[in-house]
Amino acid sequence: MAKDKTLYTCSECGASSPRWLGKCPGCGAWNTLVETVAETPGAGKNRLSGAQYAGLAPAQQVVPLSAIEASEVARTATGLAELDRVLGGGIVEGGVVLIGGDPGIGKSTLLLQALDALQHLGLPVLYVTGEESGAQVALRARRLGLAASQVQVLAEIQLEKILATVDAVQPAVCVIDSIQTIYSDQLASAPGSVAQVRECAAHLTRLAKASGIAIVFVGHVTKEGAIAGPRVLEHMVDTVLYFEGDTHSSFRLVRAIKNRFGAVNEIGVFAMTEQGLKGVTNPSAIFLSQHSEPVPGSCVLVTLEGTRPLLVEIQALVDGGGVSPRRLSVGLDRDRLAMLLAVLHRHAGVACADQDVFVNAVGGVRISEPAADLAVLLAITSSLRAKPLPKGFIAFGEVGLAGEVRPAPRGQERLKEAAKLGFTVAVVPKANAPKKPIAGLTIHAVERVEQAMDAVRGLA
Ligand SMILES: Nc1ncnc2c1ncn2[C@@H]1O[C@H](COP(=O)(O)OP(=O)(O)OP(=O)(O)O)[C@@H](O)[C@H]1O
Ligand SMILES: [Mg+2]
């Protein structure tokens, strides 16, 4: 097959060169040239201007927004309730989903289970495996108890062959495992390169939109945890899901980072078992470690993930540092930790300047909401003073640079969930204090960090 001419185009300014250059000849930026396919002569017509367009194509009718009928998107629930929750109710016709996560976390497992469930509903489904052979996929299916599954499997990595097969099979849902292994004949660069991933994803996305086939891409992640390849991949797709969780524990979280068809930050919780991933329907208490008695440096936070309150234990260890003390956090933002330590010093008079400070969110869960601030500060002071917080204690609230404690969204729901799980004492922002008391829960409403410290000291 004759190859189209290859061009190198700058991702910043769009200038192109027939050779790869380290420095863009257009804008002078470094390392911005990526391989692209040279446009066919016809494509250049788009650059015509003004009246010249009229000769090429008739002007199209425009319609006011109000005249367009807004039909609800057609969704198919997979039957895996936790997956449906993050997808916003199910797989959307013509929708494109990208699912990323660490190696071995369970991406292929989850998607194989989902395809099998969809196939049981009578939908034609296709699993394109670029990473494993058909035999390996069959072996996994057997382990998952899906030996008799009618999921169609294609072991292929060449884009053109995949497109032709998808067109012929016309599945309702097609999984591409993984997008980084697929390559197009049109580009000379290796599979997984920025140009290949972008080109292959763009072709498949176009196919999804044109044919109504829902496509799910599995994406590799970089060492830092971001989806490997071009950033544009996340813009191209409708939904981005990330697998989170500590591979050493059996719990896995799937979080919606972007969703054009549903809420973001919604999470689905699964447990990895011999028979695959099983949804955890009531996950509020799984991120608590079991201490028989309260221990210093531990504070339970009620966080809100998507639409669901979760109780997560925040652990802190403050220990004698050296000349340059360390601040380390797992599952929480490190810059925010440094800021909180400064607030603690300035407004509550608690100094950790000469101490190492380690903070951890139990269970491998990642917490990005600022409502975790108060729990982090209370865990740190508890560790520093070697005094545990009272039994059955929870906290939440955002802490500002001026030392103020700001309300967290949907405080009532958080408090009710904590009460339901048997927690008895809470320190929360004043604006989150409920008007009517919550049975079994004593609430201390605070407006400032120093008040929170005093409230806790009074409880001990
Ligand atoms: N016999 C088994 N019993 C329990 N769990 C198993 C068993 N075999 C595999 N697993 C689990 O399945 C995981 C592999 O899942 P899977 O292959 O779906 O991951 P993945 O995210 O697709 O990985 P990759 O990025 O390598 O493709 C293993 O890490 C392990 O946790
Ligand atoms: Mg896999």
Image: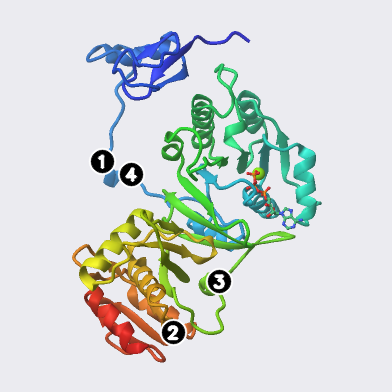
How many residues crowd mark 3 within 10 Å: few (<14), some (14–19), many (20+)? some
Of marks 3 and 4, the one in the foreground: 3
- The outermost residue toward the front is 323
Q: CA distance from mark 1 to mark 2?
A: 51 Å
Whether residue 293 sits left or right of residue 47 in the image: it is: right
Q: Of the residues tagged 2 and 4, which is closer to the observer?
A: 2
Marker disc for residue 419: 2
Q: Quadrant of the C terminus?
A: bottom left
Mark sitting earlier along the chain (2/3): 3
What label does residue 286 carry, if any? 3
Q: Label 4 belongs to which residue?
A: 68
Q: Is disc 1 placed on a helix, strand or loop?
A: loop
- SS class, disc 4: loop
Q: Which of labels 3 and 1 is toward the front?
A: 3
Rendered position, 234 above or below 92: above
Q: Which residue is mark 1?
A: 64
Towards the viewer: 293 or 371: 293
Q: Relative to 318, say whether 56 is above or below.
A: above
**Residue 406 in the image: x percent, y percent?**
25, 69
The mark nearer the N terminus, 1 or 2, is 1
Q: Which percent across, then down, holds residue 373?
A: 33, 66
Q: Is mark 4 within 8 Å of ligand 1?
A: no
